[in-house]
Amino acid sequence: MIFIRRPQTDPFFNLAAEEYFLKNSREDVLMVWQNKPSVVVGKHQNVLAEVNMDFVSENNLPVIRRISGGGTVYHDMGNINLTRISTSRKTDRLVDFREFTRPVVDFLKQFGLEVAFEGKNNLTVNGKKFSGNSAHVFKNSVMHHGTFLYQSDLNRLEKVIHPGNSHIVDKSIKSVRATVGNIAGFMEKPVTTEVFRRHLEQFLVDYYHIHTVAEVTPEEKLAIEKLVQEKYSRWEWNRGYSPKYIVEGDRNTEYGKFHVSLKVKEGKITDIALFFEGKKLEKTEQKILGQRHDKVHLRKVLANNHFSEVIINTLF
């Protein structure tokens, strides 16, 4: 196993790096890394059903889809991410969250913390979740990765995660809500996130008996950046990959009552029925049909409509 130093904090680059090393590394890989504030959704999730898009837009937070399943998570520099890639494992059980999280449990014992493994893939202290984990299998390799809340902005985390939208009907994977807590909050004498990360890295290097520490090479960096351009920065992956869904319901506004029924596939509106006070708004329907189900995009489409903002809000 090799340890790859990861000082990069660009979330697009970091998620692309995971996929790159999973599909190209011939050795087992361990990485510890952090992201600037961002929202990361599971591969099979519906972004609109999971994320408070108004909040992330107002705060310029990127929303990025990862290749593993599971729920939506908030990343910032108070959160530490751990990735282990195992190649050519000859075992019937490629995915094993207990095994993956065991060194984290052992590491935290040094600080007098009793960590519990709960559910399928979570770690908790005193009943509060601080780590969620997921995995992705590629051929004979498997990537386990997880978040590690140390000094994260929990207030922002709560605002990012969507409380649920009763107007959206789909079959996407839903995030499981949980009470969360920062590890630093459980420690008697917490250190900075930077110092804590260094201690964690050294513990893991010793735990796995790692003798090779490497940097991302210039060639690897170019390949990862290419993957960012072709996939991780693209709307088609981050938003368009959401499972197909339906939005249906009534909206009472200061102008009157709207009724909307629309279907979305690959992020685009494939069918729509829009009524205002019982009258069908055919011209507006024609403009919207085939467009991205995205507020920013629809504002451009309906730029000359005096009621554009009211109409757009009825579509979500």
Image: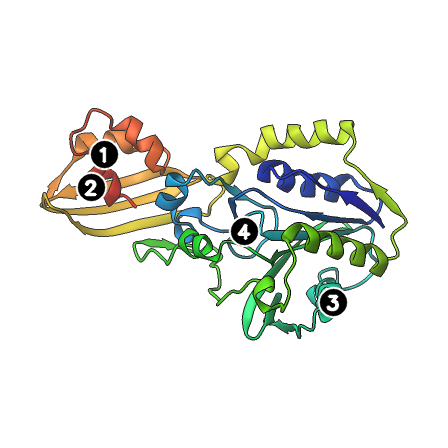
Q: Check residue 274 in the rendering and tell me which mark sits there, or answer none.
A: 2
Residue 230 in the image: state x and y as whole percent: 59, 29
Q: Are marks 1 and 2 in contact (CB under 8 Å)?
A: yes
The answer to whether 274 appears left or right of 194 in the picture is left
Does residue 104 appear in this view?
yes
Give the residue at x 61% y 56%: 147
Residue that carries the numbered disc 4 in the rendered image: 42
Q: Are marks 4 and 3 in contact (CB under 8 Å)?
A: no
Of the numbered discs 4 and 3, the one sitting upstream in the chain is 4
Give the residue at x 9% y 43%: 255
CA gap, disc 4 to disc 2? 31 Å
Q: Quadrant of residue 165?
A: bottom left
CA gap, disc 4 to disc 1? 31 Å
Q: Secondary structure at mark 3?
A: helix
Closer to us: 202 or 251: 202
Q: Secondary structure at mark 2?
A: strand
Is residue 55 positioned above or below 147 on the image?
Answer: above
CA gap, disc 2 to disc 3? 53 Å
Q: Are marks 3 and 1 in contact (CB under 8 Å)?
A: no
Residue 153 in the image: state x and y as whole percent: 49, 54
Residue that carries the numbered disc 1 in the rendered image: 285
Q: Nearer the viewer, mark 4 or mark 3?
A: 3
Residue that carries the numbered disc 3 in the rendered image: 102
Q: Secondary structure at mark 1?
A: helix
Give the residue at x 64% y 32%: 227
Tag 1: residue type?
A: Glu
